[in-house]
Amino acid sequence: MKKLRKILLLILLLPLLGAALSPVDLNLNGKFVEETPLLEKQGELFIPIEPFSKLTSLQFREKNKGDIILFRDNVFIKFNTNSSTYFLNGKEFTWKNPPFVENDELYLPYRILLDFMNFQYSYNAQEKLLELATGTGYDVSLSYRQNRQKVDFAEAKISYNLPYFWKRTSLNSFSSLENSLKIEVSSRPLGEEKPADAIKRLVEEKSFDDFEKRTPRQLFVEATSIANYGYVKKEQDLYYYYGISYFTLENRLIETTFCAQGATLEPILKLEEDILSSAQFNAYTIDDMQEHYVELEAFTSLKMSLDDPLYANMLVDNTLAFKGEINPSIKELHATVKRGDRRFYHSFAVEEGKFDTSIPIPFGLGFHSLSIALSPPPEEETRASSLPYFEDKNILLRFSLLNTSLDEGLYLSHSNLVPTQCEEIGILSYQVRNKSFDYYKAEALLSLLKENFSLGKVDDPLLALEEKTLSKKSAALIYAALLRRAGVPTQVISNISQTIYGVEILSNGRWIVIDPYRFLLNEDPPLDHMSLDQDHFGTRAYY
C-alpha cells in the first residue's frame, strides 16, 4: 500500500517536477506521513521548509528581500535565496547543494536541517525513505552527529558542550533523557595541598571493587592538563563506565564525573573525551560556535518567539535590538547584562503580547553575557552578589555577545604592516578553517609559520612573504596576518625598545601573549610559546 501511494504520487507530480525530481517517504516518530512533501533531486534529499516546520518544532521566518531564518532550540540558520552562502549560528558557509523553489515551495538540502538542528534520523536512499525522530532516545554510537549545547557550571566557572537534549538535574549535573548518561561537576579549594596529592587522595577514596581500572589518560585544553581515570565492567550485553577527571583552575580542583552505559565501550569513551575537550574556563567564550543552554520549558510554555534569533557571541555595537512575541498575560520582561562582576538591569514593557526594545550593552568592548527573565531584578542591596543564572527559575533564555566598535575592527583588519589580503596568507590561514576555537587556530598557524618560513633579517612583511624569511618583526607581522585572516582578533606588540616582537590574541574572553619568533628559534612544541605571562615583553608598544 505504501509503495502504491508512492507510485500514485509520483504519477501526479511528474508533469510538474520533471525527470530530475522524485518524491520521498517520511516516517515521523514511527508513523508514516501521508502525502509526504519531501523530494529527491539528482540523488540528494531536499526538504520543503514551510510544511516541514509544521511537522516539527522548527521556527520559520521569511523576511524582506529574500532573507530566510530557521530557528530551533537555540540554533539558527540564516540565508538569502539570491546568495550562494548561508550562516549557521553567525558563521558563514557556502552551499554545496543550493536551495531551490518548486511549486512555490522552498526546498533545502536535508543535511543542513537535520544534522545542524537537533534531529535524529536515518535516510535510505535506495528505498527513498526518511525516518525521523524529534528528540527522544539516544544512540551513543551516533553522538558525533548530535548537535551540542553549551552549558555552564557557574560554581566551577567552566562550561562543557553536551548533547542538546540533556537536561539539568541539579545545579551541578546533567543527564540524558533516559538517564543512561550523566555528568556532574564539582569544585573544591586546594588550599596548601598540591594538585597531584589532592587528585591521588580523591582517586583512592573512590570505591570501584567490581570495576576494571583502565589506564589513566591525559587531555590538554588550551594548555590545561586534564587527568582522566576510567573504570568499566560488563554485565550481559552492556558496558557500564564511570570516569572521573581533574584539572586545576584558580587554585581550585575541578572534578568531573561521567557515567554511561552502552552496547559498546569505544563510543562511550569518545563521547567523554569530546565533552572534556570542549571545556571552556570562566564559563564563557567568545570564539565558540556552540550555543548556550536555553530554559526551553519556560520559553516554550509561554509561546515566546523572536523576530531575530539570538546566538552565542553575536556581534553588537553598544545596544542589542530585542523584538518578539510572548503570552499576552506577561506585562513586563527583564534583561540582565553581565560582564565580570558588573551588572546592568533593563526592564521593558510587553504590550498585547509584543515587545520591542533596545538593550544597552554598557561595559565597553568585549564579551558580555545576557539573560532574559520574567522575575524582577534583584533589589539594589543584593545586586553586587554573584547569582548563577540557573538559580532563577524564571529565566527564559540566555546567551553571550561581543560588544564591538570601529576600534574592535582593527583587531581583524588589513593594513600595510599586517597584510591579511595577500594570496599566500589566505592559502595558509584556510588550512585552520575547521578548528573550533581561536586558541587552537593560533596553535596550528604557529606550526604552519615554521613549516613555510625560515629565519632571516627581512622586516618588511611583503618582502618577507616573497623571500619566505622572517625577522623578529616580520615574524610577528606575518603571524598576525594569518591570525586575522582566520578570524582571530589580534594585535601586534613589542617591547619599548623594539628589540622583540610578538602578538596578543583574544580567546576565551582574555588576551593571550604569543612569541612566534622564539618558537621559530627553538624545537619546543607550540604550546611552550603560547599563553605566556603578560609581562613577557615588559613594557609594551602596540601596532
Image (cartoon, rainbow, N blue to C red):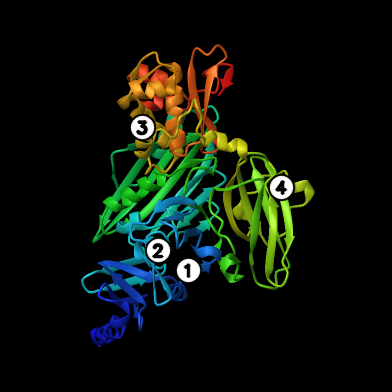
Query: Sequence order check: which comes first, mark 1 or mark 2?
Result: 1
Mark 4 to mark 2 CA distance (whole Å)? 36 Å
Residue behind mark 4: 344
Specify the quadrant of the image occupied by residue 140. bottom left
Query: Sequence order check: which comes first, mark 3 or mark 1?
Result: 1
Q: What's the amino acid at mark 2?
A: Leu
Residue behind mark 3: 424
Where does the C terminus fall, quadrant-wise? top right
Residue behind mark 1: 58
Pick the front one: 395 or 129: 129
Q: Is residue 195 above or below residue 64?
A: above
Mark 3 to mark 4 CA distance (whole Å)? 45 Å
Residue behind mark 2: 113
Q: Residue at x 30, y 26 (%)?
A: 451
From where the camera sits, is residue 515 visible? no
Kindly indicate whether the residue at mark 1 contacts the one at mark 4 (C-beta within 8 angstroms).
no
Where does the N terminus fall, quadrant-wise? bottom left
From where the camera sits, is residue 291 visible? yes
Mark 2 to mark 3 CA distance (whole Å)? 35 Å
Q: Residue at x 45, y 38 (%)?
A: 438
